[in-house]
Image (cartoon, rainbow, N blue to C red):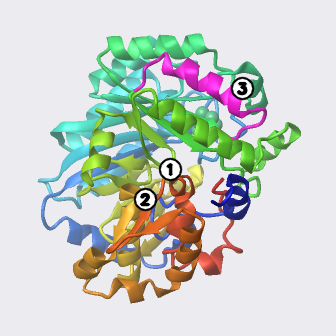
Amino acid sequence: MVSRHHLVSKYSRQAPRYTSYPPAPHFREMEDPKRAMQLIDDRNEVPRPLSLYIHIPFCASLCWYCGCTKVITRREGDSAAYLKRLFAEMKGMKARMNSGNRVAQLHFGGGTPTFLTPDELRETGRIIRDLFPFEEEMEFAVEIDPRRLTEDHVRALAEIGCNRASIGIQDVREDVQRTINRIQPMEINEQVVRWLREAGIRRINVDLIYGLPLQTRSSFEETLEAVKTLDPDRFAIFHYAHVPWMMPSQKLLDRQPMPDAHEKFAMLEMMIANLTGSGYSYIGMDHFARTEDDLSKARRNGTLQRNFQGYSTRADTDIYGFGMSSISQIGDGYLQSVKDLDEYHRRIDNGQHPWHRNYFLTEDDRIRRHTIMRLMCDLELDFDAIGRQWNIDARSWFGDAVAPLENMAGDGLIEWTPGGLRVTDTGRMFLRNIASAFDAYYADTEKKVRYSRTV
Ligand code: SF4
């Protein structure tokens, strides 16, 4: 048997998280918006269920580990100025859309969506609902930072139909919180969860991060035990992506000891054992959900999906992103909006589209996207079924993947099956490495595009 130490040393490499394929660094400068417009028109010839992502970029203070696109401000009026453009962008898109479309999923992300005042949240919800009718059983999720949240925020979210909250906690220990510049006593988390449940928002996700300075396996177990008392339905426990060349504030974390790959792997093993022993299913990568949760059911019945928000239960939706830096996934195209706030305002004020990068999938991209997403969701691949679906000989199509996969089979990460392959329990912890074998761009760009490490 290959030792754990050997596996961690060998597979702690930079690789994408595969929330899209190709990964976003491969998107290209948009030269001609006509192709994007045509794509949208084509996809709106018939009514479809939609997923909407709304990006609210503002945060009142900077968490030093942060890898999101955000704007740090406490200036009153910044959010109102932004919302004016956001509503204009949505109205412009609505005009191109099929009037029979219905929203199946709505996600407010950031930044900090609850940076908006309660009344701004109410207005945002009202305008979205007026523009884009909702399905009866839709999911409406909001990312929540408990530190500045008021009970009126929670009431406003309930009024506009929010039914799932993702609470950013990261770590409950004060020494870790000081190191990352995010002080958040557990009492605040408890109060926010109480408010949410009282307001009828009962689906609770908790976001944690492992791999931060001062964290150890046992300190993180303490965090996990404390957070379990909140009784969340889902955990997203993200591996900290240390990318200081992209996020300079992360250099501030280098002043404190960080867990090495072996310690982080021990944390991952601990959290899988802990949560699966406490009524949660390990969905994949960084997600856990209560056994009876929709995500767990989707995992069991093979309908799980992966997208920019991580894992999802809806397969058939195009994703329309609104706001600066948001990414839309529409049919076979990706469109990414500008990341600069002033540029976003300027474009919308001039009646222009907000996209600066895009990508349109080739036939090979489509096959590989399907294959990588099924691997990430089902933890197995059936090459015969892929061959039938795409009318190819899948084994020769993925000929380049055979050598790295044989190597991984030797290391016990995958097992060959009569129809394809299956990811082993050990392999689940190296899923990004396994997926990269099917990524046509990975070998060429591993040295140029600097992703975060897999372990
Ligand atoms: S981690 Fe969240 S709250 Fe902190 S700066 Fe980043 S986006 Fe803002």
Residue 130: % across, % down: 21, 39
Where ligand 1 lies, by quadrant? top right
The quarter of the picture where the N terminus appears is: bottom right
Query: Nearer the viewer's eye, disc 3 or disc 1?
Result: 1
Q: Secondary structure at mark 3?
A: helix
Residue 353, located in which quarter of the rendered image?
bottom left
**Can you identify the residue that label 3 sits on?**
177
**Can you identify the residue that label 1 sits on?**
285
Q: Residue at x 48, y 71 (%)?
A: 22
Q: Can you see residue 205? A: yes
- How many marks are shown on the rendered structure? 3
Q: Nearer the viewer, residue 440 or 346?
A: 440
Q: Indicate yes or no whether the magenta region holds residue 98.
A: no
Sequence-wise, the earlier of marks 3 and 1 is 3
- State yes or no: discs 3 and 1 in contact (Cβ < 8 Å): no
Query: Is 431 situated above or below 154?
Result: below
Q: Secondary structure at mark 1?
A: loop
Query: Is 86 situated above or below 120?
Result: below
- 287 sits left or right of 42 in the view: right
Q: Tell me the amino acid under the disc marked 2.
A: Met
**Can you identify the residue that label 2 sits on?**
376
Q: Secondary structure at mark 2?
A: helix
Residue 102: % across, % down: 17, 48
